[in-house]
């Protein structure tokens, strides 16, 4: 029995279609009859531990049960660590395999825990399948046999963590289709700013850029592999016809790499009555032709998430955002998207070394310029968090005393949970006073410009927030916004978030 588990990803158990597990399941389905599997989603289960425990206990001990867990940093990691530890205590013969962003980056830390047996690194559909095939032959495979599986990390004869080179990225256009019949799709339909029945999808792997604060870079090394426009449009059509979907979130790291693919896709879904959202590069979109913009608008594109990252050209260069990125391009795309009535959603990474205070002040001032150009622009703020082996910024963070935890127990502490969500925490180069300044600015900004993604915040509530925060915003006085903190208890207004994450 194979159990594919998606840990709870947020405090409110936001139901997001588990595309990574559906991709694994698709490969298992392509070998019919060989593997029995169940997908368990912690966002849908009232008691995930009880559900998994019952499934494991029901198995014949002669056949090993394999638990595959996909783990993102943050809430998923926080839930996965104690859950897997307890399952391993109850079922010592359980074989636990972790995959996803966190174990890909920190495979050695994961394997220092006795709760995890193997780590699948990178895009692991075929790595996981190869491991399952080996486990069918040998319950305790030899190190030499494990060493033959690309993308696998494991323990050597001395019990020390070792890793094989990453496997080639599987091409999504040649992977089997998602087995939607193996999950309760109806339970993933959500009401969002896109529509009353919104569903997610993942149509490509990777990104061709090398931003050195992004965890994707070490996984794909500049490769981007997409499904065809026809394949993606067919999925959207299936969503509409089978489940009445009217909004689609694309979870791709960069949906808009190919203008030709985007234009073809947009033309194919015009008339389906769906709104959609995806992630893009600013400089990429600025190169799109007017005809492509018209197709995107007419097909229902409502919002695009883009990494503006900084108001400083020097910082953008240190981030390796590419030779074509410049703060003025953020302003240019903000103007252009206002023309096409498509909302730009900009993320900014603040507090970058070597001068985090100056970086924060410059970017706050730049965000105000963005809002002047396009008041509808969404602003998502993060503190810089280092990515292992990611160049100058990481080296400078280490020089300031930054180190990653060496145990899973440390990773699930409150301060590192905050770190994983890029909110605050263990960045020694950012003084508490500057963290407070950024937090206060964010509170004032989100009150004066409430996010359009908060579908519950309408009418007088929105007007009251804007009215009470206007003097602070116009005077650039953000310090200690007590009245907004109190108001938040009665009118909960959410921070803008990248859709689906």
Image (cartoon, rainbow, N blue to C red):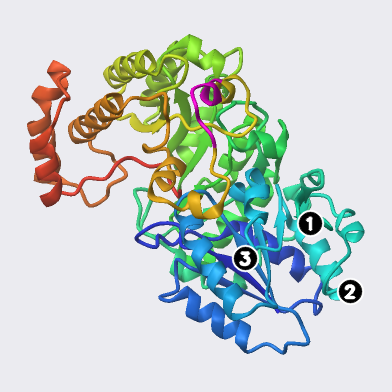
Which residue is most to the front? 158
Residue 224 visible somewhere in the drawing: no
Residue at the disc numbered 2: 137
Specify whether 302 is left or right of 70. left
Specify whether 299 is left or right of 149. left
Q: Are marks 2 and 1 in contact (CB under 8 Å)?
A: no
Lower sequence index among marks 2 and 3: 3
Query: In front: 300, or 248?
Result: 248
Residue at the disc numbered 1: 127
Query: In front: 354, or 1?
Result: 354
Q: Position of residue 341 (x, y in %)?
A: 36, 31
Residue at the disc numbered 3: 115
Q: What SS does tag 3 mark?
A: loop
Q: Position of residue 410 (x, y in %)?
A: 49, 50
Residue 475 visible somewhere in the drawing: yes
Q: CA distance from mark 2 to mark 3?
A: 22 Å
Q: What SS does tag 2 mark?
A: helix
Q: Is residue 61 above or below residue 133?
A: below
Q: Where is residue 91, by image quadrant?
A: bottom right
Name the front one of labels 2 and 1. 2
Residue 402 is a magenta residue: yes
Q: Residues within 10 Å of mark 1 (few under 14, many from 20)?
A: many
Q: Position of residue 393 (x, y in %)?
A: 55, 22
């Amino acid at each position: 029995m194979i159990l594919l588990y998606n840990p709870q990803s947020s405090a409110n158990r936001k139901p997001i279609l588990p595309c990574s597990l559906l991709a694994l399941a698709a490969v298992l389905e392509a070998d019919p009859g060989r593997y029995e599997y169940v997908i368990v989603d912690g966002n849908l289960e009232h008691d995930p531990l009880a559900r998994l425990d019952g499934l494991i206990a029901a198995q014949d001990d002669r056949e090993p049960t394999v638990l595959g867990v996909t783990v993102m940093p943050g809430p998923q990691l926080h839930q996965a660590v104690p859950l897997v530890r307890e399952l391993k205590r109850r079922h010592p013969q359980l074989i636990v395999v972790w995959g996803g962003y966190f174990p890909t980056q920190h495979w050695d830390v994961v394997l220092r825990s006795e709760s995890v047996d193997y780590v699948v690194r990178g895009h692991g559909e075929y790595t996981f399948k190869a491991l399952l095939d080996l486990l069918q032959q040998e319950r305790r495979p030899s190190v030499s046999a494990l060493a033959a599986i690309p993308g696998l990390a494991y323990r050597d004869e001395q019990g020390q963590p070792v890793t094989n080179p990453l496997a080639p990225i599987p091409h999504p256009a040649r992977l089997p289709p998602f087995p939607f019949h193996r999950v309760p799709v109806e339970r993933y339909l959500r009401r969002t700013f896109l529509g009353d029945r919104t569903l997610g999808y993942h149509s490509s792997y990777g990104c061709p850029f090398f931003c050195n604060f992004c965890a994707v870079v070490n996984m794909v090394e500049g490769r981007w592999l997409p499904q065809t426009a026809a394949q993606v449009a067919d999925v959207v059509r299936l969503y509409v016809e089978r489940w009445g979907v009217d909004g689609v979130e694309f979870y791709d790291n960069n949906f808009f790499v190919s203008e030709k693919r985007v234009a073809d896709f947009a033309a194919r879904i015009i008339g389906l009555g769906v709104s959609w959202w995806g992630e893009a590069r600013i400089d990429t979109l600025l190169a799109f032709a007017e005809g492509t913009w018209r197709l995107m608008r007419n097909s229902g594109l409502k919002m695009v998430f883009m990494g503006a990252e900084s108001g400083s050209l020097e910082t953008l260069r240190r981030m390796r955002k590419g030779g074509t990125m410049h703060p003025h391009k953020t302003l240019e795309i903000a103007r252009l998207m206002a023309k096409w009535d498509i909302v730009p959603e900009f993320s900014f990474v603040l507090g970058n070394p070597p001068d985090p205070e100056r970086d924060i002040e410059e970017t706050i001032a730049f965000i105000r310029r963005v809002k002047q150009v396009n008041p509808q622009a969404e602003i998502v703020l993060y503190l810089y968090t280092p990515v292992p082996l990611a160049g100058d910024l990481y080296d400078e963070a280490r020089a300031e005393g930054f180190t990653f935890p060496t145990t899973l127990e440390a990773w699930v502490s409150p301060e590192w949970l905050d770190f994983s969500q890029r909110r605050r925490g263990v960045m020694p180069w950012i003084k508490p006073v500057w963290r407070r300044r950024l937090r206060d600015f964010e509170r004032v900004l989100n009150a004066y410009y409430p996010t359009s993604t908060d579908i519950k915040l309408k009418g007088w509530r929105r007007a009251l927030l804007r009215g009470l925060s206007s003097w602070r915003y116009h005077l650039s006085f953000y310090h200690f916004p007590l009245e907004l903190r109190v108001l938040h208890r009665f009118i909960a207004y959410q921070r803008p978030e990248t859709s689906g994450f």
